[in-house]
Image (spheres, rainbow, N blue to C red):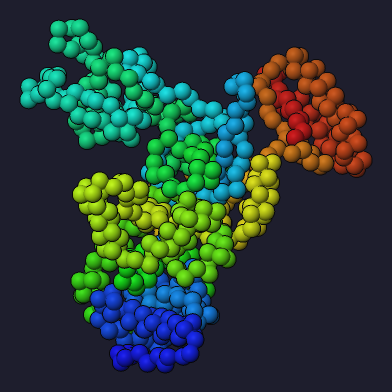
Amino acid sequence: MHTGKLKSSKYRHGNTYEVDRSISQSTLEMATATDMAGFPAPVWDSTHVSLKDVLMQCEIPMVAKITKGQFHNLGVSKIPLRKFHQDVVVHSIKTGVKVLAHSVSRFEARDGRTSKIVALDQRLSIPLSYNGWFELLSEDGRSARPIDSVYRLAREFPSKCLVRQNLKGYMSNEDGKLTFDKSKVIPAGEQLTLAGTVNGPGDRVKFLRCTDSKGVVLYLSFDQQGTFTPIANPGDVSGVFMFKDIVKVFRLPLTVKLVMGVWPKVDPSKFTGYMRLDWTYTDETAFLCPLDKHSIRITPVPTEVPLKLNPVQNMEEIKESQSFKDMMTKCNKMIANYNNTIHLIVAVPDAVKRRKSQDLANSLTKQNNTINRKNNANSLMKRSKSREELLMDEMDDLYQYIREGKSPPQQKYGYDSDEESYFEEPAYEPLDDFRARLAMLERGQPAHKNSKYYRPTSGLYVGDENSPVRSRVDQHRHSFGAVIMSSQSAGQLPSGKKDNPPPLPPRRYQRTESSPMIRIKCNQQTQDSSSGSSRGELQKIVSDPKMNRRNSRDSSGSQTKVLMDDRSTSSRTGSSGKHQSMQTFYL
């Protein structure tokens, strides 16, 4: 490792000197990435492993160097002036089920009676583990009206409801009775289980008795205002659903509205909360963390990206360091937030790729919007400073505001985007191809069969998050048209028998040219009553001109002969004057 002084000769032109100095500084930073992270000196292995084979050939987490390929700010740069991160920590590689969706917007007519849904260009990828509440929308984008008071909530009295607005609730004392001395703020997003109504002190006001998710008994006054939505039962359609339950119960595509959940911090014109769920697919993602002294940031990389990695040999020594343990704790939190976030599928512009700052490009945020150049310049200036420097600058502004009475700070300390709850995914296909497949999907055609990256999957393993989805779903995957069909009932996992294939769907009845004959025994009848009816009916079926045209002449003659023999044989049998008649049916 190079530890000596940098020798940079002074040229006549200052620009040339600055370029030479920047190249040397960039080389030094990339060479000492592990030192800046606080790790022991790495001992690189001579083997090279592709990202797709890391899970089979190496133990993770591990520290590795990217020797070939690039993805966003990771990899080997082909241009000397562009700084990429080569030393990374491969935290984990996970396969999960996601739902491909796109944003829609709802427009109302001037009279307010009619409305329509218009699709937007923004594509979304939603993990199945996203903890958000959704409600179903009609074709014109309308949903059920929420409950706006406690009195109406007590009248409708659903088993469970979702609180959509903060409100005050009274608690009980040590004796278990209602008291006004103890109260609690019920936050939005809380689930309440209704238990009944009680009378307050003096029997003047009635209260609704309910229980929150932690088992705390709360009392809501009938004269309180609030916003509530019933939580849908397994057989209901109205109400709010968890995202996983929607994929379990209903067929896609489906239009939904996000009622409660983590909202992406983007331009409202890109994400409105209304979305159209297209289909489910499996995705294998590698979580890489570049070694940077300024920040710890997880970068989700699809395993389909052609990256070559060179692992280290002294990984056990690196695992014992405290800095590595702190990084793993931070990465675990980011991955948990990754699974609880709606991801935006974007095509990163070339201008954003060529920036000196190689942070993950959030091209849809207001701070990074190329139209607003002032905010873009401020964000670039922020990235050049460390977090401690930004915090100290803001403290200076606050002291100056308190002492001298100048204008208050315009912007508080923060990042360009929420690093723990904002994630983007690359666009694997052009937008025009995506629109064409959406049009085919709306017409009921199988539009995702030719998709290379967004491979459809079944909803068999919706309830099992920790299972290896990729290996098992491929065995039980089968689609029918544009609708993903499940071989078992929704929400049930398949049995442990691997040899039994999933049951086939029922075949549709089709009448062929060569219709077979099926003879069915009828109930025993008297000879007088059955001989005439069966003989007349049989003669009518055999002599039908349609059947004669459908069958050949030889086959019809042989069939008639066999039927006549059967009829005569059945008339001779039976000692009590009764015989068994045969009727011929054509399928």
Residue in front for this viewpoint, 278 or 485: 278
Residue 65: quarter of image:
bottom left
Q: Is residue 243 left or right of residue 182?
A: right
Residue 394: quarter of image:
bottom left
Q: Position of residue 420 (x, y in %)?
A: 35, 55
Above/below status of 26 relative to 397: below
Q: Is residue 118 left or right of residue 415?
A: right
Above/below status of 167 relative to 382: above
Residue in front for this viewpoint, 576 or 120: 120
The residue depicted at 38 percent of the width and 20 percent of the height is: 148
The residue depicted at 14 percent of the width and 7 percent of the height is: 202
Kindly tell me whether residue 52 is visible in this rendering. Answer: no
Residue 566: quarter of image:
top right
Q: Is residue 108 left or right of residue 581?
A: left
Above/below status of 17 relative to 379: below
Residue in front for this viewpoint, 90 or 445: 90
What quarter of the picture does the C terminus occupy? top right
The residue depicted at 25 percent of the width and 71 percent of the height is: 324
Residue in front for this viewpoint, 285 or 480: 285
Q: Is residue 466 left or right of residue 445?
A: left
Above/below status of 280 relative to 569: below
Q: Position of residue 57 (x, y in %)?
A: 40, 77
Farthest residue, direction front: 404
The residue depicted at 25 percent of the width and 60 percent of the height is: 392
